[in-house]
Amino acid sequence: MQQDTALRVDSVEVFDTLATKLNARPEQYQVLGDAYLDIAFVMRRPDNSVFRIRVCFEDLSITKVAEIAEGEEENSDCWLEADLSVWEAMFANIREHGQATGMHTVNALTMRGVDMQLRGSDPMGVDRFSRFNQTLQWFLEGSNYDNT
Amino acid sequence: MVQTTHDTQESYPDLPDHSPIGMPLDWTWLRGAKSEWGVHPKLSSRGLTMMDIAVGSYGEVPDSPPHRSMAPRGADVDDDTPDMGYILNKKTDVWADNVRELYEEAVARQWSATRDIPWAELQELPSDVEHAMCQLCTTLSEVEMIASDLPAKWMWRMNHDFLEAKMFLCTQIMDEARHAEVFRKRALSNGGGLLKSSSGASSLLRTILDAGTYTQATALLHLLGEGFVLDIFRQGELISPTAVEKRMFRMAMQDEARHVAYGTMHIRYAVEHDPDVIEEIHEALDRGEMALAEFGTSPDLSTALAMLLAGGAEDIEEKGFPLQMEMSKKLFSSYLARCERAGVSRLERTQLPLSLLGIDLDEIKQ
């Protein structure tokens, strides 16, 4: 992840980078198995603007990374919503430790629903967050997944 | 469309009627089996899935199968094939529209409690935390196997035309064996051991196992019981003292969410196609919710969870119990939302103390 430090978290580029890394090494994800998850990430900036991006997992790859407009996150299975500072802290933690530690995994962050909210229009979609959680976590941990 | 292989009869006119030792031979499989011949399923990107081969008549799951044998669905079945004694002979009894997908997912996402948990990274923990983790693992290794025993109790009574549902339940049985394994291993691996087994757990398990119908059983097991355990596994992030336990809970959580997904969609399918079944589901959940509440608040499980949430005995009152209450609210909110999705709204019927838990019914209705 060191090469990502210059990238803004609230950018398509950082998710494109993560997707490229995953797609380049699908064998690393083979142990977790195929994943089918359509998830959006919503980042609230300090200036009240919001960055939204949608990422689609299919088989052992990422098939889509796209910035989306307000409300389009509701077309995903589920979405994760937090202040930009929470996302920045999460990625900084990954860069520092090679993987998310302590309360910086997405499961931990959403557990209490205070720092980050897990939302979805359908409980079945929300449950996909649990069904493919380790794959999602490794995706966010980028190139460090082989250390976990 | 069913086509027979009858047209091949003329291609093999010289086949013998008897074997070299005089036994009569049967060539009907070559000369007229009533089968859909010539199907060509298309491969998907990951290989040949159960969804891919659900083509033509082979993909049609009958509402009421004509046979009660173990003959594979779509085969040309002899009229005198014995009845296997199946009692779940309606599609509404067992089916869920996502069951093929869930089976493939389960097969693809199997893991090993021996290999995939970094046991070598376990660390010596404070005695109170180690005791609490061992108590939780004792309870979990006890309750997890109900989700193996219950499908096993019913599977052999399910009509074989519902093959995909039975196959999925086989994966669930394997998943739960692995969960019993991983929690037993954790209890024994870090200098602790197995601790208390209370009557509350067995009371809940007995309620689930004794369900009168499979649909009641799956409401109690998948929707209620496994939904509860799924949320405990999600809490693994908060209660795990090290990355080892976090991995353990996260891997188990993925499996558990599949089981809940099957149960939710099975109940939905049953209710949509046989609305009469809804009252029997409600009756089961009336009993189950009380048994679950008794289990969830049992002194040993609740204190162990509070201890882990607090990170030790010192902060248990200031941090442990309040966090536990917060988690209970999330847990029961998730359960009630799944009931809504399954088409069995519990909002007006449940005897759970929703106000005490601070659950917002409007939020669930949305």
Image (tube, helix red, strand yellow):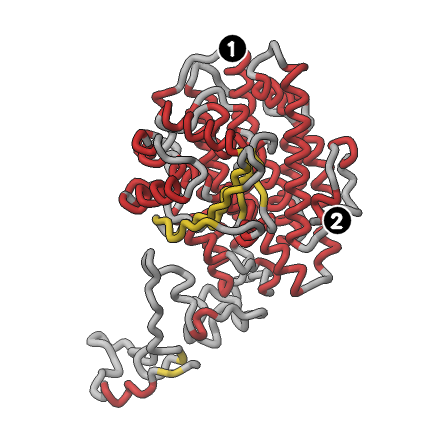
Q: Nearer the viewer, residue A6 or A119?
A: A6
Could you tell which of marks 1 and 2 lies nearer the N-terminus?
A: 1
Q: Residue at x 43, y 12 (%)?
A: B124
Q: Chain of mark 2?
A: B
Residue B361, by quadrant, is: top right
Identify whether B64 is placed above or below B249.
Answer: below
Identify whether B271 is placed above or below A134.
Answer: below
On the rendered image, what quadrant is the C terminus of chain A found in? Answer: top left
Report if residue B303 is visible in the image: yes
Q: Residue at x 32, y 43 (%)?
A: A22
Task: Residue B44: give x, y in percent of width and height.
Answer: 35, 61
Q: Nearer the viewer, residue B146 or B263?
A: B263
Q: Residue at x 59, y 24 (%)?
A: B197
**Disc 1 to disc 2, how far (Cα)?**
43 Å
What amino acid is labelled 1 in the image? Answer: Ser
On the rendered image, what quadrant is the N terminus of chain A found in? Answer: top left
Residue B71, by quadrant, is: bottom left
Q: Chain of mark 1?
A: B
Tell me the tag on residue B283: 2
Q: Which residue is mark 1?
A: B127
Task: Residue B139: give x, y in percent of width and height.
Answer: 57, 27
Helix, strand or loop at mark 2: helix
